[in-house]
Amino acid sequence: MIITAISLYHVRYEMRRPVTFSSVKSLTAVDSTIVELQSDRGLSGWGEVCPFGRTYLPAFAEGVRAALQVIGPEIPGCDATNIGAVLGVMDRAVAGQTYAKSAVETALWDLLGQQSGLSVSALLGGVHADRVPVPGGLISSTVPGELVAAMRDLRDRGYRHFSPKLSGTLSENLACVGALLDAVEGDEYLLVDANGAWTRDDALRIADVLSGAPAYIEQPCRTYQECLEVARRTAVPLVLDEIMTEPSVLYQAWADGAIDGLKLKISRVGGLTQARKMTDFCAESGIGVWVQEAAGGEIAQAAAGHLAVAMAPRAMRGAVDLQVYNTHSLAQGGPVMENGHLVVPQTPGLGVVPDADRLGDPVAKFRLD
């Protein structure tokens, strides 16, 4: 199956409400790049990459599209079923730029699934579940009562673990953590997420409050060394997110005893191939995994959902609901939210068909000569 053309689309998702955490301040919309790969079999494969603004991750939408302008001309003529070879073509075209390459790679998996009649999760090694739990996000508030009310609302909708994004002062964060812990019920737990914004001292103060509680600390500090020091000085399980950029970083964190859980963003590590290496290692090493993307629409959510249900059950902890942020949908099909879980249909490929009117015209297209 030969790729005959690659098209790039620019999509803007308006958000239901402004989001503030860590380096992100009152973000009201996100800028996504959609990749379409057309094949000589009349099939189109889709991929998406959507950094959360310009200041959260070491990638931004305009940079992604600039990299894809370099990569794009090399893709037509490639065999879509030989994903490893296409990854090599992209690496020879430009070093790094894993975010841009991930969108192309996801589209390749989508094409392969459609051609074979199998879902992406089946291609990734097998389907272990039809749905995965989703952490209920608690964001944009430093008022304990508001966070507790939001948690109770999410509980009524079927969520059983919660992810407060703490962006206030130390005293505000401590008050929020205390209130949320008092409101936790049964087997619920918290993923207390700093998005790398805390100092080591603040992280240790908050860890003291969480000690022995049903909670994880997620990405407390900006650098790996700071997070490692927190891990060495507290018994609270540590989830790493933003600094987990490739398999070798994960292996080092495990060797150092710095990681109990992984928030795995597919585009950050370069696509599903690398992400699958990391989930396999986590399953073998006793590390829980929540599969995510920073932002995006149905295409990005489908990639995360398919990887999540293909993981070994002993490692799978959850997936992501990207639509909780967006005011409008982009596509039909793919995973849907149901009672606090992401339900992943086993239709061929990603199972997502974008709305042509919503996509608009491509901002760039490269064809086979």
Image (tube, grey):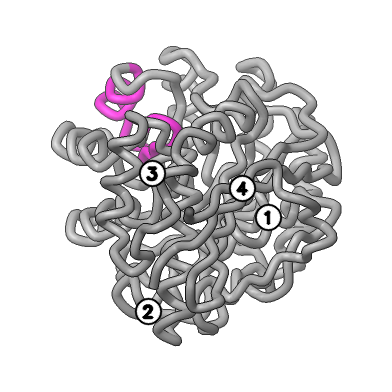
Image coordinates of residue 30 in percent, x first then y, are: 73, 37
The residue tagged 2 is 122
Q: CA distance from mark 2 to mark 3?
A: 20 Å
Q: Nearer the viewer, residue 233 or 356?
A: 356
The residue tagged 3 is 270
Which amino acid does the dot numbered 1 rest on?
Gly
If you read the primary sequence from the N terminus, does the residue marked by circle 3 or circle 4 appear first?
3
Observer able to see residue 319: no
Q: Which residues are magenta?
A: 226-243
**Is 22 on the left-hand or right-hand side of 203?**
right
Q: Nearer the observer, disc 4 or disc 1?
A: 4
Q: Nearer the observer, disc 3 or disc 4?
A: 4
The residue tagged 4 is 365
Which amino acid does the dot numbered 4 rest on?
Lys
Q: Nearer the viewer, residue 127 or 11?
A: 11
Residue 297: numbered disc: 1
Q: Please give the name of the residue rendered at 47% of the width and 70% of the height, measured from the top-left corner.
A: 111
Q: Is residue 163 above or below residue 171?
A: below
Image coordinates of residue 318 in percent, x first then y, are: 49, 61
